[in-house]
Structures are given as structure tokens and as C-alpha cells.
């Protein structure tokens, strides 16, 4: 028996598939219909302006109508409300997902709690900036996954020209990562932040212990007094030896990969100040408001999810690529990989029944123009169809000759146009090696200015896009049991327990284990 989701996709797949140029030829207002400028005034935190252009995707009225019907069938509106109203949207773990509340979008009680937690963080941040813990010039932020990728992205994006404190994010248990941070920091003026929702993650706890030892061995009188904990397990942090005054808690219902808005964002505030941190929250909240209020294809994260679903489920695309034409977003693909692949890389529906169709595509990407000279060959002429997202800022991030930024934008726009148009670069227009098939989709996010608010908005947009994808597929985007088996096996290997396969046993033997 086929399920209603598969039936909907059978119907979508049976529709005619006009090319992108045919779609543009058939509708002179395609750009007007498939793009939208989102603007918001963020009071004293500035203005937000982002143009979202999904016109160079294969979505047309017929496909969109069917996807809107699928969203209705999946109770998108009800699930969206549950997300913001503290409903148990993470059923396998029996939890709500309240990251929205951390930026003001949730129930009154959740938002009140979040504001109090942010205010508490603000007090500690100001006190540190004013020297309450002595002279602090460096922060080593230790965390992994969702406790590292957001802070690393935001500090890199917002703190390139001026930082109040030099921040190093260390995640890998490979001691080289921590050693590199030690080499760049003066122990006498270094603060350590231990960022872990659970306060049990092996990599983070091992790195934290080594960082404390480094302070001790380098003559810091009270190493524990230089530690701040960012966690949903404050008791665990107290047990570890962190003083309660330097523990910044956040609610259990804020998922790791959705936690940048909570105290996990502490290094961002330390690097660029609370005002920019608040602007990041305000930019994200502007997207929350749009996501909560806009319906159907006018809802930008839902429209993006329609395209994502269409390419994975109707066109067989196994990956999607994102290229930021902005050095400040170099870490964005890494961030989106966790957000999308850990959320939607699932094989069962919410009720445990196996999914009949592909789930999340592999997210990958890079930075333009570098990627043009490395991987775009495959995008233009390879055999895979890969939908591409471009992200760029109209205002430059640099102060050099404007020719730099102009060229950056020109290149970005040219790539989207070339992917769609195709052509032949040979003199007679006939050489197959120089032929470009075209009809390759891309989408564009063009921000007025990549400031803290725009960054917050871009991240929140992708959070909601991920959620919308999950709703359309009927899966739970908020658990991540797929990471657990490897963790258990690592523990078993460490303990010399378990019945391992011959290959693994041989590897252990080669490395002198067991
Ligand atoms: O192993 C995966 C994971 O649980 C992620 O979901 C999470 O962001 C990361 O590990 C770090 O977890 P924690 O913040 O509890 O240390």
C-alpha cells in the first residue's frame, strides 16, 4: 500500500518538467513571483534587508500547488505553531524545541526565561570586559558540534576587523587543535569557556581538562577561576569544579545545533559585544516572524524546502551545494552540514515507519570565487544535477578598492546565469567537450550588508528551512540517535570490551591497543 506522501510525489513526478529557460520564457513576471525582499526594522539594532531569489529553480505553479497541498496534508501550519508554542515536536526525546524563544519567538513564559538567561550572560560578559576576572585578552572556547560550529561561524563572520577579545574555538579531540590555541594565547590573560549541552561529551571534557592543566602549569594561581561553563547541565558543571557564578545555563529544550542563540553564543558576545549579539538575535527573530506569518509559497523557508524536496525526491539529487561569495561566511557550509544532515539525515518517519523516499541531501559547499577554480567544473559539466545556493552581500566587507567587491558580485551572478543558460564555448559551437548543458538550478540570498542581524537572519532562515523539510517528509529533525553507536563502540574499544570484526581487531592491534 502506498502512503499519501509517496502518492503526492508520484503525482509531482508525473508533471511536465519544463527547463528553466522555458519557465522564464513562459512567464515574464517569474522573477517577481519567485523572489521576495524581506525587510525589517530592528529598532536601535539597525535594519535588515535580504533578497531571496528562487526563480532559477524548476518550481512552477503546478509543482508549487502540489507541494502546498502536501504541506497542508502534513499539517505544516499546525506543526509550525507547535514549534513556537512549546509543543512536543521532538517526540522521540519527549521535548519541545525552544530555540526560537531564545530570540523572542515562543510562549510568554519561555521568552521570559530566555530573556533572563541572556541578561545574566550579558552581565557576565560586561563584567569580563571590564576586568572582573583580571586582564582577559584571549578566550579558548571548547565545545564540539552544535556547541562549536555556531560560535566559530559567528565569531569569524562578525569579528574579523575588530574583536574585544581574541577567540579560539577548539573542538577536535586531536591534541593538535588545542596546542594550536595554546600557542596563540597568553595563559596569564586567557579565559576558558567549556561549552557542552550535556557536559559529558568526551572530546570537550578531555580538552577542558587539558586546558585547565595548561593554565596550572603556566603559573595561573586559580585556574578554575578562569573557567566559564555554557551548558544545560549546570549540576554537571558544578561537579566538574566550575563556580556557580560562572555557569551560564540554557534550557534542555534548546537542541545542540540550534543553540547559538543561547549561552553557547557567549564567545560571540565576548568577541564583538552584547549589542551585536542582540542584533544577531533580532535578525533571527525577524525571520521567525516571517516564518510564523507567511503562508504557502510566500513563506521563504517553506519555499526553499519545496525546492529542496523537489530536487531530492523528484529529480534524484543526492547533494545540495552552498557557496557564499563572502570570506566572512567561509564556515557557513560546515555549520549547515550539521544543521541539515544531523537534523534530517534520517531513515524513519516520526512514528518509526521506514521512509519510502530519500531524506536530507548531502550539504556541501565553499566560498566564492575560490570554488569556481576548484569544483565548479563538475557543477557545469558533470553528470550530477546539483542545486546550488549562492549567498552574497551588496555592501563589501573590505575597505580595499571597490573593484574587489564588484568583481566578487559579478562572478557570483555570472555563475548562476551560466548554470542556467548553458551554451558552447568552442569557435564553431559544436565541440562537445566545450558544451554546457545548462538548465542547472540555483537560488540566491543577497543581503544588503552582512552584519550581525543579517547573519542571525540567514541562520534562522536555514533552521526553519530544515524544519519545513522535516515536516514535508514527516520526520523528526530534533533528535540525532545516529551519532550514538559510534560513541558506544569507541567506549568499548577503549575498555577492550566487545566482539569486534576482524578488520577492526587488526587495526587495534596495529595501533598497539588490546
Ligand atoms: O554527538 C552529536 C552531538 O550530540 C551534537 O548533536 C551536539 O551538538 C554535540 O554532540 C555536542 O554535544 P554537547 O553540547 O552535549 O557536548
Image (cartoon, rainbow, N blue to C red):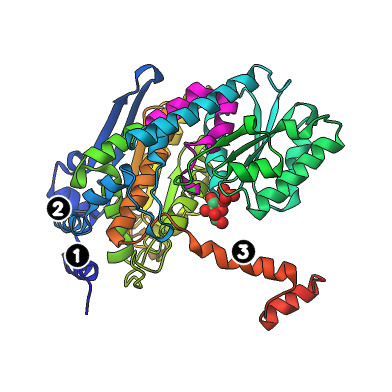
Quadrant placement of the N terminus? bottom left
- Residue 340 in the image: x percent, y percent? 43, 53
- Residue 490 within the segment the image draws in magenta: no
Tell me which label, 3 or 2, sits earlier in the chain.
2
Give the residues drawn in magenta, as a range: 256-284
Q: Kindly report the distance in space between the C-alpha atoms of the residues bearing marks 1 and 2.
A: 11 Å
Residue at label 2? 61
The quarter of the picture where the C terminus appears is bottom right
What residue is disc 1 on? Answer: 12
Asked whether mark 3 lies closer than 8 Å to ligand 1, one says: yes
- Residue 437 shows which numbered tag? none
- Classify 10 Å Cα crowding around label 3: few (below 14), some (14-19), many (20 and above): few
Q: Measuring 31% from the left and 51% from the top, which residue is drawn there?
A: 468
Q: Earlier in the sequence, mark 3 or mark 1?
A: 1
Secondary structure mostly seen in magenta is helix
* Residue 259 lies in the magenta stretch: yes
- Secondary structure at badge 1 equals helix
Whether residue 188 sits left or right of residue 305 in the image: it is right
In the picture shown, does residue 216 fall above or below 65?
above
Residue topped by disc 3: 487
Residue 334 locus on image (x, y percent): 52, 49
Q: Which residue is more in the foreground, 22 or 244?
A: 244
Amino acid at each position: 500500500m502506498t502512503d499519501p506522501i509517496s502518492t503526492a510525489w508520484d503525482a509531482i513526478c508525473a508533471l511536465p518538467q519544463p527547463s528553466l529557460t522555458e519557465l522564464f520564457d513562459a512567464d515574464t513576471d517569474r522573477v517577481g513571483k519567485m523572489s521576495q525582499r524581506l525587510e525589517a526594522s530592528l529598532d536601535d539594532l539597525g535594519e535588515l534587508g535580504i533578497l531571496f531569489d528562487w526563480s532559477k529553480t524548476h518550481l512552477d505553479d503546478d509543482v508549487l500547488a502540489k507541494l502546498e497541498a502536501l504541506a497542508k496534508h502534513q499539517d505544516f501550519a499546525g506543526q509550525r505553531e507547535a514549534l513556537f508554542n512549546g509543543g512536543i515536536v521532538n517526540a522521540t526525546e519527549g521535548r519541545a524545541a525552544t530555540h526560537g524563544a531564545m530570540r523572542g519567538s515562543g510562549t510568554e513564559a519561555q521568552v521570559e526565561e530566555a530573556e533572563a538567561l541572556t541578561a545574566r550572560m550579558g552581565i557576565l560578559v560586561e563584567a569580563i570586559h571590564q576586568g572582573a576576572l583580571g586582564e582577559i585578552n584571549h578566550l579558548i572556547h571548547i565545545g564540539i558540534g552544535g556547541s562549536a560550529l555556531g560560535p566559530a561561524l559567528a565569531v569569524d563572520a562578525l569579528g574579523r576587523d575588530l574583536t574585544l577579545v581574541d577567540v579560539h574555538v577548539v573542538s577536535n579531540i586531536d591534541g593538535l587543535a588545542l596546542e594550536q590555541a595554546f600557542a596563540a594565547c597568553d595563559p596569564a590573560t586567557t579565559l576558558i569557556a567549556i561549552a557542552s549541552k550535556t557536559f559529558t561529551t568526551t572530546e570537550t571534557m578531555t580538552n577542558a581538562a587539558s586546558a585547565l592543566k595548561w593554565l596550572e602549569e603556566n603559573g595561573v594561581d586559580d585556574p578554575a577561576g578562569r573557567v566559564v561553563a555554557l551548558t544545560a547541565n549546570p549540576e554537571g558543571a558544578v561537579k566538574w569544579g566550575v563556580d556557580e557564578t560562572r555557569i551560564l545555563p540554557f534550557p534542555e529544550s534548546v537542541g545542540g545545533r540550534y543553540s547559538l542563540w543561547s549561552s553557547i553564543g557567549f564567545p560571540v558576545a565576548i568577541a564583538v559585544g552584547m549589542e551585536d549579539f542582540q542584533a544577531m538575535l533580532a535578525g533571527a527573530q525577524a525571520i521567525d516572524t516571517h516564518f510564523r506569518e507567511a503562508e504557502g509559497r510566500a513563506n521563504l523557508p517553506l519555499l526553499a524546502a519545496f525546492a529542496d524536496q523537489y530536487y531530492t525526491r523528484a529529480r534524484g539529487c543526492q547533494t545540495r551545494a552552498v557557496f557564499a561569495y563572502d570570506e566572512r561566511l567561509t564556515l557557513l557550509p560546515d555549520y549547515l552540514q550539521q544543521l541539515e544532515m544531523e537534523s534530517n539525515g534520517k531513515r524513519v518517519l516520526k512514528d518509526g515507519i521506514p521512509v519510502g523516499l530519500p531524506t536530507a541531501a548531502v550539504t556541501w559547499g565553499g566560498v566564492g570565487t575560490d570554488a569556481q577554480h576548484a569544483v565548479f567544473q563538475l557543477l557545469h559539466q558533470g553528470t550530477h544535477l546539483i542545486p546550488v545556493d549562492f549567498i552574497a552581500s551588496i555592501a563589501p566587507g573590505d575597505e580595499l578598492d571597490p573593484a574587489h567587491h564588484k568583481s566578487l558580485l559579478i562572478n557570483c551572478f555570472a555563475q548562476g546565469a551560466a548554470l542556467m543558460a548553458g551554451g558552447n564555448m568552442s569557435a564553431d559551437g559544436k565541440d562537445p567537450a566545450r558544451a554546457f548543458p545548462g538548465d542547472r538550478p540555483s537560488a540566491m540570498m543577497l543581503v544588503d550588508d552582512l552584519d550581525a542581524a543579517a547573519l542571525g537572519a540567514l541562520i534562522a532562515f536555514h533552521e526553519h528551512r530544515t524544519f519545513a523539510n522535516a515536516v514535508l517528509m514527516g520526520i523528526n529533525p530534533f533528535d540525532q540517535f545516529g551519532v550514538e553507536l559510534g560513541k558506544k563502540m569507541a567506549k568499548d574499544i577503549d575498555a577492550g570490551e566487545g566482539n569486534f570484526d576482524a578488520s577492526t581487531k587488526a587495526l587495534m592491534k596495529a595501533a598497539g591497543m588490546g
